[in-house]
Amino acid sequence: MAAAGLLRTARPWLSSFRPPASAASFAAARPQESSSAAAAPAAAQPPPHVEEEPLRQADFFRVHELFSRRDLLAARVHLGHKKGGRHRFMEPYIFGCRLDQDIIDLDQTMAHLQLALNFTAHVAYRKGIILFVNRQRQFAHLVETTAQECGEYAHTRYWQGGLLTNAEVQYGQGVRLPDLIVFINTLSNVFEPHVAVRDAAKMNIPTVGVVDTNCNPCLITYPIPGNDDSPMAVELYLKLFKRTIIRAKDKRRQMEAFYGLQTSLGSSPSAHPKIPLGTTTSV
């Protein structure tokens, strides 16, 4: 069946609603939800310090603590495809070639993965919609389960054309596009790139994608050079994304509670020390 509601009508402050994710369908809010959201009181808006605080630090969510080079090596992230199938735009990310098999530079993988996780955390912190996309059948259940556990969405079936570029015609006015698309694999098959990569670029939707040595990284906003076929590597990617999203959402609730308490007490947030990540407040 075609996706009945990949895009849903909602205001930005309603994006925290996360129904269970499914393989090819997502929740679609009714048109009257937008009118009720418009009538919401101004007091429901978060304090400005909640939105501004993460932007003052380069790694506010400390995503560099989630993985190491040894983890990438153990998950076989460095193993690419055969040299004959190498894409010319992936050559800067290749460390060398052994037994006619490309070896990916893990130093570059670590840097790009940290950038991708950091951006994903900021999107989740601001209650954005994150969509996981994967076309490999052997990882479909794992991707769907991961998206559901972190309160986001997944699409692991055939991608119907126009889900992003023709959304208003298919689903009506006022639909909301995903704020971030995460590609576990950027190819639909061995030869063709995923249609959603091109459509997301047309609609200016930021993307995070794992790109193997036979992929084209040009249309991905945050490419992650690495193996996209090994089960161990895919499990590592999904675990990192899930932990990053959950950490960002927990931090959002913590910051809202902290600054909400200060506002209720009538004190200035700038007069109090910053809360380190992982601490709790007594509310």
Image (tube, rainbow, N blue to C red):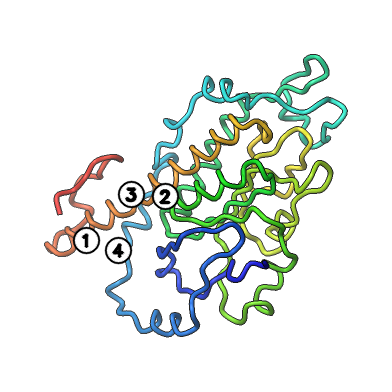
Image position of 30 with respect to 151: above or below: below
The tag on residue 203 is: none
Classify 10 Å Cα crowding around label 2: few (below 14), some (14-19), many (20 and above).
few
Q: Nearer the viewer, mark 1 or mark 3?
A: 3
Question: In x, y percent, where is residue 205?
Answer: 62, 59
Element at badge 2?
helix
Query: Residue beneath label 1, please?
Result: 260
Residue contact between numbered discs 1 and 3, judged by CB atoms under 8 Å: no
Q: What is the three-letter code of the residue carrying label 1?
A: Gly
Q: What is the three-letter code of the residue carrying label 2?
A: Leu
Question: In x, y percent, where is residue 38?
Answer: 40, 82
Q: What is the three-letter code of the residue carrying label 4?
A: Pro
Q: Nearer the viewer, residue 224 or 131?
A: 131
Residue contact between numbered discs 4 and 1, judged by CB atoms under 8 Å: yes
Which of the 4 image quarters holds residue 85? top right
Element at badge 4?
loop
Alpha carbon distance from label 1 to label 3: 15 Å
Alpha carbon distance from label 2 to label 3: 17 Å
Alpha carbon distance from label 1 to label 2: 19 Å
Query: Residue beneath label 4, please?
Result: 47
Q: Nearer the viewer, mark 3 or mark 4?
A: 3
Residue contact between numbered discs 2 and 3, judged by CB atoms under 8 Å: no
Element at badge 1?
helix
Alpha carbon distance from label 3 to label 4: 17 Å
Classify 10 Å Cα crowding around label 1: few (below 14), some (14-19), many (20 and above).
some
